[in-house]
């Protein structure tokens, strides 16, 4: 079933645009981190880039029957700084999603009875909370000139749940089985 309410559809397109830009930005920032001698921060950016792709895809799928041309405006951090600056850009973006964007989008979808959009916004919101914390931790360490210590970053391909060095038996957000997680 397709989204019935124009406001929720607009929010899905906006979220799709923002998540798509974050996906690409994190790939670039991950390469920058690797070039600066922070391979694990690079890995974190690459993994979270994948989670952002999961969110963008979920939002896109919710608009399945709405095929048309749209101009999609989404705020985003642009530019390449050093890894500490790039991590701050990532933190700012994630906090915007957690504190402002997704709570409004989620409540609107609930109010309008858009269950698929509600699920998609909920999945993204829960993952973005984790991403903000992981980027903050990485930035604190990078400020000291050190890299993160980690073996793997694991992403649920259904909701984008992100966890370091381990995978739960079932995703705590969407219930996906451990075997589905993608490991970076």
Image: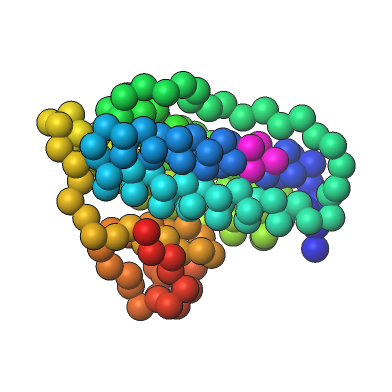
Residue 76: x %, y % from top left: 53, 27
Quarter of the image with the C terminus is: bottom left
Q: Is residue 9 visible?
A: yes
Instruction: Pick whichever, 91 or 95, lies toward us.
Output: 91
Q: Is residue 87 magenta?
A: no
Q: Nearer the viewer, residue 97 or 76?
A: 76
Quarter of the image containing the N terminus? bottom right
Residue 114 makes an appearance in the image: no
Which SS does the magenta portion mostly show?
helix
At 29% from the left edge and 60% from the top edge, which residue is drawn?
A: 152
How many marks on residues? 0
Compared to residue 59, the image places residue 25 above or below, namely above
Residue placed farthest to the right in the image?
68
* Stretch of the chain drawn in magenta: 13-17
Residue 38: % across, % down: 25, 40
Residue at the spot x=51%, y=64% of the render?
A: 157
The residue sitting at 23% across, 37% down in the picture is 37
Q: Is residue 82 left or right of residue 21?
A: left
Q: Position of residue 115 (x, y in %)?
A: 67, 60
Q: Is residue 68 above or below residue 91?
A: below
Q: Residue furthest left?
A: 144
Q: Quadrant of residue 145?
A: top left
């Amino acid at each position: 079933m397709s989204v019935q309410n124009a406001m929720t559809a607009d929010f899905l397109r906006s979220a799709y645009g923002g998540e798509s830009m974050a996906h690409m930005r994190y790939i670039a920032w991950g390469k920058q981190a690797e070039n600066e001698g922070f391979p694990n921060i690079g890995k974190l950016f690459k993994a979270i880039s994948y989670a952002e792709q999961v969110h963008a895809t979920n939002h896109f799928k919710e608009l399945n029957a709405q095929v048309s041309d749209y101009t999609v405006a989404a705020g985003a951090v642009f530019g390449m700084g050093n890894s500490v600056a790039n991590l701050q850009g990532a933190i700012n973006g994630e906090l915007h999603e957690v504190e402002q964007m997704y709570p409004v989008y989620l409540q609107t979808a609930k109010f309008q009875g858009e269950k698929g959009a509600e699920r998609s916004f909920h999945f993204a919101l829960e993952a973005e909370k984790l991403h903000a914390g992981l980027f903050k931790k990485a930035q604190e360490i990078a400020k000291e000139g050190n890299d993160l210590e980690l073996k793997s970053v694991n992403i649920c391909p259904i909701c984008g749940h992100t966890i370091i060095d381990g995978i739960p038996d079932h995703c705590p957000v969407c219930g996906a089985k451990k075997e589905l997680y993608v490991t970076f």
